[in-house]
Image: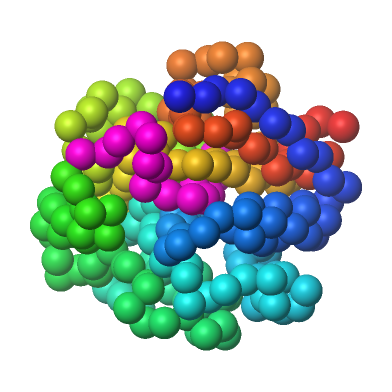
């Protein structure tokens, strides 16, 4: 597993989204067969998703081959604005020719978090075609992640039991920061089964936690590994430049 870090710093959040979109399209264009992408919530990824609906990025994607997954989700009603799924649908998936069978959402309430986690792990295993992740065949082609002000990523929060889970791909997650709602998250082993990981972070408010992550602090975002390098797309404010 790789912990190699590649920093890509842009002038501002919009330039960051352009750079991330260029990378996203090029990364998928280099791969053959079905493609699996794990998506993140948040305002910075949203800018990326909006770009993927427009040329030149849209025309560079073969949507018939891309399968869309989520790194984490809030277990609230499907029409709740806090759902990462709703944000991605509104920003991206409702505007591109993504086959419905290629969109793999995490269940909404009234499903319980535990039931949603079990069902999503089963969905991932069906797609992968095996019950055990093999190091020679990553589950995801791209994993998109964010970093919270407390250093969490996906819904893996500092000091919580889900950080230690190694025998599951998906678990229910203890609420961390506000909003205090039940969540489901990929585990570290599932995140690590990615050919490429990209963190997206913009704004001066991200600089303090990024300083801690890059200095090796014991934080979830600092413990992510992958099959390949870990890309950090930042704007100058987040990078402190």
- Inspect this view and state whether residue 76 appears: no
What segment carries the magenta color? 132-147
Q: Which of these two is toward me, 232 or 11?
A: 232
- The vertical placement of 238 against 44, above or below, is above
- Judge from the rendering whether residue 21 lies leftward or rightward of residue 154; answer left or right: right
- The vertical placement of 41 against 208, above or below, is below
Name which residue lies at 69% across and 71% down: 60
Name which residue lies at 48% across and 33% down: 227
Quadrant showing the C terminus: top right
The picture places residue 121, in percent across and down from the top left corner, at: 21, 52
Looking at the image, the residue that sits furthest to the front is: 32
The picture places residue 26, in percent across and down from the top left corner, at: 69, 56
Name which residue lies at 47% across and 28% down: 225
- Judge from the rendering whether residue 121 lies leftward or rightward of residue 16; answer left or right: left
The picture places residue 132, in percent across and down from the top left corner, at: 20, 39
Query: Magenta segment: does it hold 140?
Result: yes
Name which residue lies at 14% across and 66% down: 111
Mark count: 0
- Inspect this view and state whether residue 25 appears: yes
The picture places residue 94, in percent across and down from the top left corner, at: 51, 84
Query: Magenta segment: does it hold 126?
Result: no
Quadrant showing the N terminus: top left
Most common secondary structure along the magenta stretch: loop
- Judge from the rendering whether residue 63 lies leftward or rightward of residue 108; answer left or right: right
- The vertical placement of 200 against 99, above or below, is above
Scheme by which the image is coloured:
rainbow
């Amino acid at each position: 597993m790789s912990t190699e870090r590649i920093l890509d710093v842009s002038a501002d959040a919009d330039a960051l989204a352009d750079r991330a979109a260029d990378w996203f399209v090029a990364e998928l264009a280099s791969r053959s067969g079905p493609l699996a992408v794990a998506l993140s919530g948040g305002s910075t990824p949203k800018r990326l998703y909006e770009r993927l609906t427009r040329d030149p990025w849209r025309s560079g994607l073969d949507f018939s081959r891309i399968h869309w997954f989520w790194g984490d989700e809030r277990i609230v009603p499907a029409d709740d604005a806090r759902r990462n799924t709703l944000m991605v649908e509104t920003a991206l998936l409702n505007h591109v020719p993504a086959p419905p069978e290629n969109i793999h959402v995490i269940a909404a309430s009234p499903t319980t978090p535990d039931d949603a986690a079990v069902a999503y792990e089963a969905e991932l295993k069906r797609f992968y075609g095996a019950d055990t992740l093999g190091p020679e065949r990553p589950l995801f082609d791209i994993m998109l992640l964010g970093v919270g002000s407390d250093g969490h990523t996906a819904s893996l929060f500092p000091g919580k039991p889900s950080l230690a889970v190694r025998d599951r791909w998906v678990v229910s997650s203890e609420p961390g920061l506000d909003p205090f709602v039940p969540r489901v998250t990929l585990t570290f082993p599932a995140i690590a089964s990615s050919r490429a990981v990209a963190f997206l972070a913009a704004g001066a408010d991200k600089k303090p936690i990024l300083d801690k992550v890059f200095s090796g602090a014991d934080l979830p975002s600092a413990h992510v590994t992958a099959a390949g390098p870990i890309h950090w797309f930042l704007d100058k404010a987040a990078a402190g430049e």
